[in-house]
Image: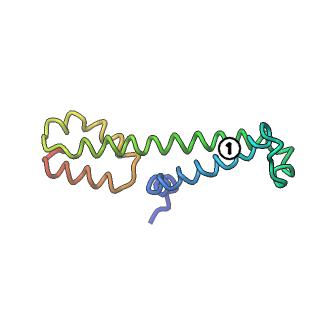
Amino acid sequence: MKLNISGFIREYILGFSIIVLIFGLILFLLSFIHYFLSDFQPDFIKNLEDWNFYLIIIGFILLATGVYYLYTYYKNKKFILEEIQTNKRSELVKMHAELKNKVKHMPSKYKKMLKDKEKELNIK
């Protein structure tokens, strides 16, 4: 069995995006507290004084990445489920290229759903 990191991440993209989003939010908020609410900051934030500039940038990047992947996952999921529910072959053929492209970036259960629908409607 071939170890493929991108395939592993694709299977668990929802969990990874939530973890990255939460981690980025924590880093961003801690650094934000240091810069803008310094009267209320806990002691452990004061110890990171030299690193807070870097942490706010890293936190923002992780937060934006988590939000992007979470949004993309749910947008693709909604599109795939709406298109697969159709029973008309012509509608599925019309959106087939876009469906295959979106399914390529989703977990394998969506690929299986598309294959089953293609088999049901006799699409190659």
Q: Is residue 2 left or right of residue 23?
A: left
Residue at point 46%, 62% (across, down): 2
Q: Residue 70, position in %: x, y?
A: 48, 45
Q: Residue 88, position in %: x, y?
A: 12, 40
Residue at point 33%, 43% (across, down): 78
Q: Is residue 85 left or right of residue 62?
A: left
Q: Nearer the viewer, residue 105 or 72?
A: 72
Q: Is residue 51 left or right of residue 23?
A: right
Extreme residue in the bottom direction: 1
Residue at point 24%, 35% (across, down): 95
The quarter in which the C terminus is drawn is top left
Extreme residue in the front direction: 39
Extreme residue in the top direction: 94
Q: Residues within 10 Å of mark 1 (few under 14, many from 20)?
A: many
The quarter in which the N terminus is drawn is bottom left
When asked about the image quadrant of residue 98, the answer is top left
Q: Nearer the viewer, residue 86 or 124?
A: 86
Q: Residue 4, position in %: x, y?
A: 49, 57
When asked about the image quadrant of residue 63, the answer is top right
When asked about the image quadrant of residue 80, the answer is top left
| Above or below, 3 relative to 79 | below
| Above or below, 102 relative to 13 | above
Coloring applied to the structure: rainbow
| Above or below, 14 relative to 61 | below
| Kind of element beneath mark 1 | helix
Q: Residue under circle 1?
A: 59
Q: Amino acid at mark 1?
A: Gly
Number of labelled discs?
1
Residue at point 73%, 47% (across, down): 30
Q: Is residue 110 left or right of residue 60?
A: left
